[in-house]
Amino acid sequence: MSVDDLAVRQGDPDLHVVDVRWVLGEPGRGRAAYDAGHLPGAIHLDLDADFADLAAGSGRHPLPRPADFTTQLGVAGIGIASVVAIYDDVGGWVAARLWWMLDNLGHPRVSVLDGGIAAWEAAGLPLTTDVPVWPATRLDLPRTEWSGIVDRDELRATLGRVVVLDARAEPRYRGEIEPIDPLAGHIPTALNRPVAENLTSDGKFRGPVDLAAGFAALGALGALGAGSEAERRVVTSCGSGVSACHHALAMRVAGLPDPILYVGSWSDWSTAGYPVATGPDPGSPPD
């Protein structure tokens, strides 16, 4: 959703704006930023508390049970009729996780604000410190189970036959730094496409043709042409299954088939004792 489209919708009782600003390793900083100023009518939801279940499985941000997730969002006031617009301050990669979750379960009207809060402010539009309270409702979505996801054992069995796109920054992919997970490097065969490559210099999404060309350059289109369904898909990965959703959104914008999400991502793979690749090359499938 563009800033202009969101501005026009201000005052729509169905509009539900969600601020999901969050900072790795700094709990509460996203909420503090929200409290200092946010889009009018926006509530704040937290990645750790509201759209991950930290005790549910492998990796740093496991998906919650769909029933728990929809119940929690219903309590926050988001229903099936809501027009949900999600924003952050990092180019949309946190917002894309909530977009992916709602879209995956079949919410019909969910979007990410293109350019985030920076684009809103650049347009001269106001911020507020007022905190809205939306009436609680039920969020009954068409699907009750997550789909289009893969775990580490399933992924390992298909490495070399799927295109794995790693959304992390280049130094983390190459294994030069690792700020939070136990090992540095990347999943063997994974190709690096940092989420910044989905964006223009002003932090907005590139156009569909440009995005499609970028994915094609990594073989993400050729991988869709032959083989069984399991062997011709694109898998997106990152640190903990959050910024990987940015590639899912970018591929949707580009008109490409939806990829599979490796939810555990590097935070899961790096704890499994599985082979690790380092350097700029993808590496070979493990034996």
Image (cartoon, rainbow, N blue to C red):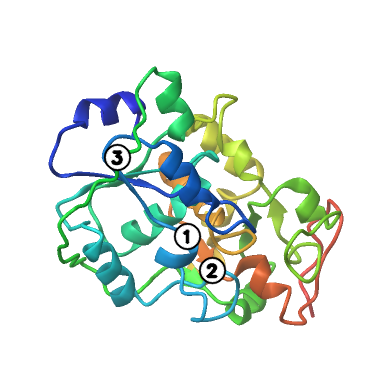
Dividing the image into 4 quarters, which one contains the N terminus?
A: top left
Q: Residue at x 55, y 24 (%)?
A: 202
Which residue is disc 3 drawn over? 130
- Mark 3 or mark 1: which comes first in sequence? 1
Q: Neighbour class for label 2 at 10 Å: few (<14), some, many (≥20)?
A: many
Dividing the image into 4 quarters, which one contains the C terminus?
A: bottom right
In the shown orientation, is residue 125 left or right of residue 225?
A: left
Which residue is disc 1 drawn over? 47
Q: Residue at x 52, y 75 (%)?
A: 54
Q: Neighbour class for label 3 at 10 Å: few (<14), some, many (≥20)?
A: some
Which residue is disc 2 drawn over? 61
Q: Amino acid at mark 2?
A: His
- Mark 2 or mark 1: which comes first in sequence? 1
Cβ atoms under marks 2 and 1 closer than 8 Å: yes
Q: Neighbour class for label 1 at 10 Å: few (<14), some, many (≥20)?
A: many
Question: Regarding mark 2 in the picture, which secondary structure is present there?
Answer: loop
